Amino acid sequence: MNASSPFAANGNVLIVGGGLVGASLAIALDMAGCHVTLVEAAAPRADAQPSYDERNLALARATVNGLNAIGVWPLVAAQATPIRHIHVSRAGEFGSARLDAARHGVDALGWTLPARELGSALLRRLDTCQHLVRLAPASLTALESHADGWRAEIKTEQGVQHIDAALLVGADGTESFVRAQLGIETDIHDYAQTLFVCTVTPERDPANRAWERFSDEGPIAMLPLAERRCGLVLTVPSESAAEVAALDDAGFIALAQQRFGWRLGRLSRPGKRHPYAIRRVASRRLTATRAVLVGNAAQTVHPIGAQGFNLGLRDALTLAELVAAATDPGSPELLEQYASRRAPDREGTMAMSHDLVRFACMPQPWLAPLRSLALLAYDRVPPLQQALARRGMGFRGEPPRAVLERLP
């Protein structure tokens, strides 16, 4: 065990779900010396993982600190692009808010990175784990509780296996099978929006600047990438999704240009487009007897502000920190502490993303001056600016110690 690790403990943990959050948790627990079984639905290849797709992730500063603490960031840092400036505005309104890394004493507010690159780095890091058993491709087919934890029935290519665990972790996404088996209900909100993501090439260099722009039709974001490209995130009403999906490249670029404007000059060369229906799915509880939910299994938020993976990683690293200090990873006290620790960050982030998309995209004309004044206040009032920057960088509530580690 690495004595300098922020994690250090023993335990017997079953993680169901090998996406970005589940893999990160497995690595952190392995650093703690825990005996972990990771059940992955897909074969262990980056191009086979559903979450390792063509999205471009916006990683908060706290997230990069956490990835560095678990030994993943050094494997992928060369492919990442720093975000040093953020510009937030609303189409047709005068207010805007700007965040600048230097103003807040950091070299970057966050970084952008293709999800596939992060997935590949996580898989390489998993290969170095010492206490981890990986079952892939495999699926959880049944659960049975007993006094000391859970017995899970896992279907693999080699046949059915039965695994006993003191702690069961559901990291299996928005449609979580674990959550359903635990009987944890969810609150669902359909935004009636569809997200299209792709890369584009702007005429002007984005120069490490990210944009978030709101309109009646929904938000649009532009993220700086390597080689002067940008990651485009375009939200449209779901009733228009089929029509947008059928556009040729010229038609799609024209729509993106009309929605984003000309701050980067003419946009061109759109990459392959991927549509995502947007729903907010929030579990009513994070824990059950000797079981816990993390990542999208716990909460799937609107992608505005790019909070999904950032929030999920803080779930994973908080859980790893608590398990590291415990003799029983599934004790009621530990799970109660986990839920309590995560509540301010989780509830605050979900409320922010939900309220922001409603407030910023409502078409009522009377809201326009209020929105502009709010953006100007965040731009020019130092305490508000500092709070916005800190939360945007992922430091909210009681963060896990790993995200407070300084980058090398």
Image: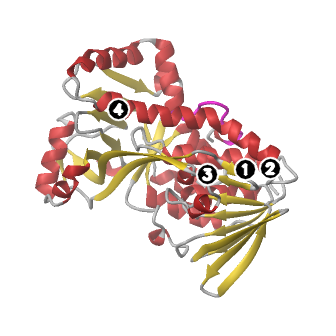
Q: Amino acid at mark 1?
A: Ala
In the depicted view, which residue is nearer to us: 18 or 201?
18
Displayed quadrant of residue 18: bottom right
Give the quadrant of the N terminus.
Answer: bottom right
Give the quadrant of the C terminus.
Answer: top right
From the image, tell me which residue sits under label 4: 358
Magenta residues, dominant SS class = loop
The spot of residue 51 in percent (x, y) is: 47, 61
- Give the CA separation, mark 3 to mark 4: 26 Å
Q: Amino acid at mark 3?
A: Val
- The answer to whether one can see residue 317 in this image is yes
From the image, tell me which residue sits under label 3: 294
Which residue is depicted at the point 34% across and 27% down? 359
Q: Amino acid at mark 4?
A: Arg
In the depicted view, which residue is nearer to us: 191 or 401?
191
Label placed on residue 320 = 1
Q: Label 4 crowding class (10 Å Cα cut-off): few <14, some 14-19, many 20+?
A: few
The spot of residue 67 in percent (x, y) is: 60, 49
The spot of residue 11 in percent (x, y) is: 82, 59
Front tag of 2 and 3:
3
In the depicted view, which residue is nearer to us: 395 or 216?
216
Report helix, strand or loop for mark 4. Answer: helix
Return the disc, 3 or 4, that comes first in the chain's sequence: 3
Report helix, strand or loop for mark 1. Answer: helix
Q: Mark 2 near mark 1, Cβ–Cβ under 8 Å? A: yes
Return the disc, 3 or 1, that comes first in the chain's sequence: 3
- Give the CA separation, mark 2 to mark 3: 17 Å
Return the disc, 4 or 1, that comes first in the chain's sequence: 1
Label placed on residue 324 = 2
Report helix, strand or loop for mark 2. Answer: helix
Left or right of 304 in this view: 339: right
Front tag of 2 and 4:
4
